[in-house]
Image (spheres, rainbow, N blue to C red):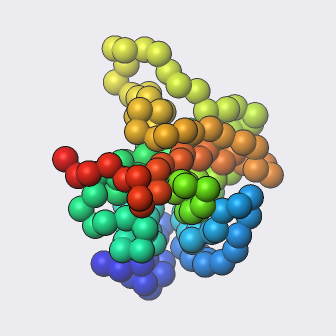
Amino acid sequence: MTLAGVVEREDAMASGKARYVWTGTGNGMELLGALTLPGVDRSVPYARLFLRDTLVPGHISPGSGLLADMALVVDELAANGIRHTASGKGGKITIALWAGRGVLRAEVTDDGADGARPVVRTDPGGESGRGLHIVAALAKAWGHRPDGSGTTVWADFPSLGASRPSS
């Protein structure tokens, strides 16, 4: 399925419509694309598809380890936004992909969680809560910032010339 399939299938998305936007520059980085999805678990695969369709082949090789790492991080950030914020209660998440300054950046913006900030949990025996550990392990750098009433969590990866080989 291509990204066009996301927009064509927006009526099948449970609680809202997918919105796809291309344009822009900012902070020395170029916005490669942004996609707003309903805050439902079924949106997570569409976030990964958007990542692949936006970055391959111009920025990442199709079989690269970098693509796999970025897809896993976007998956974790999207799932966290849906499960732990107002995005999951009839809300939305927005995935934005940026390039510049030697990095590829993936951002996920959620609808907010009453002032709560992303937290890396430390319970090794817990059955969940490892998402931000995965993000920290795979990304070159990551962080978060307030974004209106929501929160944007971002993760940076080395750009094309510095990508790690596939496993």
Q: Identify the residue shown where x is 57% and y is 63%.
A: 99
Quarter of image, res 33: bottom right
Which residue is the extreme one toward the right? 148
Up/down of 156 relative to 122, above or below: below
Which residue is the extreme one toward the left? 167
Quarter of image, res 31: bottom right
Q: Nearer the viewer, residue 112 or 26?
A: 26
Relative to 25, 54 lies left or right: left
Relative to 79, 33 lies left or right: right
Up/down of 166 relative to 99, above or below: above
Q: Identify the residue shown where x is 47% and y is 33%.
A: 136
Residue 14, image x and y in percent? 48, 66
Residue 89, image x and y in percent? 60, 51
Residue 28, image x and y in percent? 71, 61
Q: Nearer the viewer, residue 54 or 122?
A: 54
Residue 51, image x and y in percent? 43, 64
Camera sees residue 3: yes
Q: Identify the residue shown where x is 28% and y is 67%.
A: 62
Camera sees residue 93: no
Q: Nearer the viewer, residue 152 or 106?
A: 106
Quadrant including the N terminus: bottom left
Q: How many marks?
A: 0
Q: Identify the residue shown where x is 54% and y is 46%.
A: 155
